[in-house]
Every structure is written in C-alpha cells, then in structure tokens.
Amino acid sequence: MTSSGAAAGLGLLSATAWGGSDFVGGVGARRAPALLVVAAGHIFSFLVLAAICAGLRLALPSPHFLLYAALGGFEGSLALAVFYRALAMGAMGLTAALTGLLTALVPVTYSIFLDGLPGPLTAVGLTMGLAAIWMITHAPAKDGVSKAAPAPPAALLLGVLAGIGFGAQLILFKMASGGSGMLWVMTSARGAGSVAMLLVIVARPPKAPWRGFWLTGIAAGTLDTIGNLFYLDATRFGRLDVSALVCSLYPAGTILLAALVLGERPTRRQVTGMALALAAVALLSV
C-alpha cells in the first residue's frame, strides 16, 4: 500500500470513530448539557490513558511532542466550547458548514505551504473533499417548509474561530506525532483538554440537569480518543493535507448513524456530498 493509501485508510478509520463519537455525544446532549458530556469523556479517557501508560511503564516521548499535544488538546477544547456557543446563536447549518470547511482548509493550506503544491490527482481529490464537507454539513431549510433566518454575524465569526481552532488542533497533533509514545501524546492532549473544559464550565456553568451525562460522555470520549489515535497514526504517512481532509469527513458517519439508528433521513445534498467524499478518498489514496 502506498503512503497516501495508508494515510487515507487510517483517516477513514479516524473519521468513522469521530463520527460515532459525535453521534453518541449528540444523543447524550439531548438529556444533559453538551459541555458536561464532553468533559466527562475527556476526563475518563485521560484517566484511562494515564493508567495504561503508567501501568505499562511506557517510555515518555520528548517534551516538545508532549507540549504540542497539550497545546492541541487545550485549544481544541476551547474551540469546541466556542463552536457550541456559535450553534446556540442560530443559523446552525451555515455555521456548522463554515466550521467544518475551515477545519479541513486550515491544515490543507498549512500543508501546501510546508510541503509545496500537491500532484494533480491529489489536488483534485482535495478540492472534491472540501466541496463534499460543505455539502454534507450544510443542510439548508427545505423549500416551502421554513425560511432560513439571516445568519447572525457573531455566530459566523465564532464559527470561523472554531474552525480555525479545530484546524490548528489537527496541525498540532501532526507535530506531536513525530516521535514515539502515541499513548503518552494522547494522554497529554486529553489532560490539557480536560483542564480547558473544566475552566469553561466554571466560567459559564451549563444549565441543569447536571446528571445523566457520564455514560454517553464516556462512550463518546472513548470513540473520540480512538479517532485521535488513528489520526495521529495517519499523519505519519505522506502529506498532512491528505490525512486531515479525509479525517474531516467525519460528519458523514454521524449522519449515517442518525439515519440507521434514529431514522433521520439525510437530504439529497448530503447524500451527494457523501458520494463525492468517496470519490475524493479514492483519488487521495492513489
């Protein structure tokens, strides 16, 4: 298998795990504040990872790799809080699409700056992937049913900041994957992310009820951690833009799970976006 194929394959595994995490977390957020669900997952996965690393006496990687991971985990959690705030302000479809597009575009731009322009097939695959992310995440109101309200500028601004934050996290995780000790790297990221989530909760305490979030939080956090580990491994193969873009297709997994489990049918636009995403992954695997 080529390095691009390995990056794309691991990226798909990461996207699958992240999509499952968002689905489980979304279900949990219907019964408890979303920030509490995320915080529970972060804290649980941090404790488990720390116990595994200490129990197996795994060698620590170089401090700068742990620092990159901690920075990524901390600012990524803050970006998540900003994203939730943006969604609460309205225009969820446009805000989510803008955030999702920037999440992929930031590491793609960074990779082009660092590694140079990609080959023709890769460039076409990246372009198709970015279009697929927009189509999958942006679901406008159906004609004749409701009319979308104007997007609040503040919500779009926060969506942009969240997308930049998520994209920066992918870059920092790529930088953290350069050494050995993936479990320690992920432990550092989860520890810093847990601190960030607790700070957000203390600064803006979620509304009640403060119960019923641990089980879904643990499940979502476990899947998210697995997705992060697959992503860290994917970045070891080839260019960052390939692995980052394929991983950023995770909303497709969330939508498919919602269709299978909850009976929520995706729109034609989203189905077309998923087909385009598969074509993009095929090109990026060459």
Image (tube, rainbow, N blue to C red):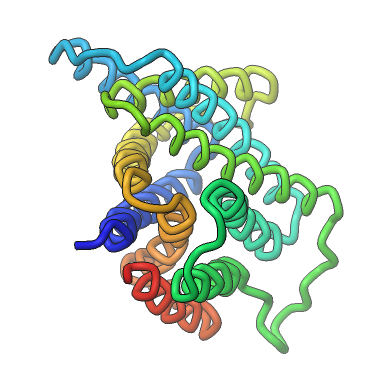
In the picture, measured across the screen, residue 72 lies left or right of residue 227, that is right
**Visible residue check, residue 243:** yes
Where is residue 22 drawn, in percent x and y? 43, 50
Where is residue 194 drawn, in percent x and y? 48, 22
Look at the picture and state if 196 lies above or below 155.
above
In the picture, measured across the screen, residue 176 lies left or right of residue 225, that is right
The residue that appears at 69% across and 25% down in the rendered structure is 204
Q: Is the C terminus in the top left, top right, bottom left or bottom right quadrant?
A: bottom left
In the picture, measured across the screen, residue 215 lies left or right of residue 203, that is left
The residue that appears at 62% across and 37% down in the rendered structure is 79
Furthest toward the bottom, the residue is: 144
The residue that appears at 60% across and 69% down in the rendered structure is 134
Q: Quadrant of residue 250?
A: bottom left
**Visible residue check, residue 250:** no
Furthest toward the left, the residue is: 56
The residue that appears at 50% across and 42% down in the rendered structure is 170
Q: Quadrant of residue 145?
A: bottom right
Look at the picture and state if 65 lies above or below 88.
above
Q: How many marks?
A: 0
Task: State the residue in front, 193 or 280.
Answer: 280
Q: Is the N terminus in the top left, top right, bottom left or bottom right quadrant?
A: bottom left
Where is residue 37 drawn, in percent x and y? 46, 35
